């Protein structure tokens, strides 16, 4: 559970209950694709029980599970079907279909093929920490995270989030740690990293299973190659790969944690272990990056009473809910 993390800060004023979350999720349950449906998405019971709750609480931590399904329709198969239809028109009417007609033929071919296409399912864990006000998604794909966040923002009244932001960027911090060969308090640097040049060469250097406290790594950073990934371990308990976009990947719990858990297994134990460790790692990582840098969501800012949240393009962003009132329209800069 939780191999990757994209972390969001939730609006401080949102005080939704687990019951309200359950009610909202019930409006968009997952349903498998229909015969001519290309993709489908929604919520499934986290415990895997049929007709179970869609929002579970373990130790005060709320766990949801998002499921998506898509039909696998190779482009080569679709193009061949379109060509067959075009050839049939040419044979019957003695003319080749135009561009618009070919687009229509493509839509027809897709409808013909979708009932026979194989389906692919994927799911991800969603963790809401109602006390610390964090939303954590178990994915390394920002596009998938945007899809989940959109569903939550649309379904939960007053729910707002923004991607976690820190005073020091992850890339700048990683570069500093590699240059000084000194990890922040509570962390250690492991044996994997990726460095990319910022100039036109776009040169990339990767180290895997290799010590990073060497002059060669320092020289790469000094010459302009910036870290995009760095393997680290927190408190000898959780190892992970930190990215320059502040995503946390390849999460693995060390033997210290697994030995303490014993032989007990199951949903509750897995949730308790994952959230128990990661709820401590996240604040420590934020502190290592200089603390949070974003204005608290939903708090008053000059010229706006609240902050609204929208999801667009590359993720969730914040902005004034409405334009500030122009108190002196005659006083304009141009």
Image (spheres, helix red, strand yellow):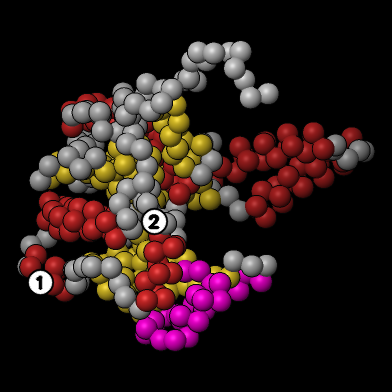
The front one of 84 and 307 is: 307
Membership of 203 in magenta stretch:
yes
Residue 174 sits in which quadrant?
bottom left
**Which residue is found at the position 47% from the left and 69% from the top?**
227
Image quarter of residue 300? top left
- The residue tagged 2 is 168
Instruction: For the C terminus, give its image quadrant.
Output: top right
Decide if residue 102 is on the left or right side of residue 334: right
Query: Closer to us: mark 1 or mark 2?
Result: 2
Q: Does the image show residue 271?
A: yes
* Direction from residue 178 to residue 285 in the image, left or right: left
Q: Which residue is mark 1?
A: 259
Sequence-wise, which precedes: disc 1 or disc 2?
2
Q: Which residues are magenta?
A: 201-227
Residue 73 at x, y = what percent?
Answer: 58, 50
Q: Give the percent coordinates (x, y) of residue 195.
A: 50, 72
Query: Any magenta on residue 8?
Result: no
Which SS class for mark 1?
helix
Residue 33 lies, in percent from the top left, at: 45, 38
Q: Which residue sits at x=27%, y=56%? A: 287
Relative to 233, 312 lies left or right: right
């Amino acid at each position: 559970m939780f191999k990757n993390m994209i972390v969001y800060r939730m609006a401080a004023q949102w005080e939704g209950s687990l019951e309200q979350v359950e009610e909202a999720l019930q409006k968009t349950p997952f349903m498998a694709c229909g015969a001519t449906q290309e993709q489908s998405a929604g919520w499934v019971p986290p415990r895997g029980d049929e007709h179970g709750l869609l929002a579970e609480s373990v130790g005060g931590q709320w766990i949801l599970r998002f499921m998506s399904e898509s039909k696998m329709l190779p482009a080569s198969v679709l193009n061949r079907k379109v060509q067959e239809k075009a050839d049939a028109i040419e044979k019957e009417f003695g003319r080749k279909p135009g561009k618009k007609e070919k687009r229509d033929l493509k839509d027809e071919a897709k409808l013909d093929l979708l009932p026979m296409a194989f389906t692919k399912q994927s799911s991800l864990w969603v963790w809401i920490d109602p006390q610390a006000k964090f939303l954590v998604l178990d994915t390394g794909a920002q596009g998938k995270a945007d899809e989940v966040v959109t569903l939550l923002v649309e379904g939960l009244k007053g729910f707002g989030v923004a991607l976690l932001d820190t005073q020091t960027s992850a890339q700048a911090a990683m570069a500093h740690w590699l240059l000084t060969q000194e990890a922040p308090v509570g962390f250690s640097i492991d044996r994997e990293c990726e460095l990319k040049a910022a100039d036109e060469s776009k040169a990339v250097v990767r180290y895997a299973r290799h010590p990073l406290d060497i002059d060669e790594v320092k020289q790469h950073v000094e010459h302009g190659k910036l870290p995009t990934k760095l393997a680290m371990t927190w408190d000898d308990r959780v190892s992970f790969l930190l990215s320059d976009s502040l995503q946390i990947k390849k999460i693995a719990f060390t033997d210290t944690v697994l030995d303490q858990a014993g032989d007990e297994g199951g949903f509750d134990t897995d949730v308790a272990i994952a959230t128990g460790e990661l709820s401590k790692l996240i604040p420590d990582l934020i502190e290592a990056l200089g603390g949070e840098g974003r204005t608290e969501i939903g708090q008053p800012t000059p010229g706006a009473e609240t902050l609204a949240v929208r999801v667009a393009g590359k993720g969730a962003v914040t902005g004034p809910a409405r334009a500030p009132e122009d108190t002196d329209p005659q006083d304009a800069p141009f």
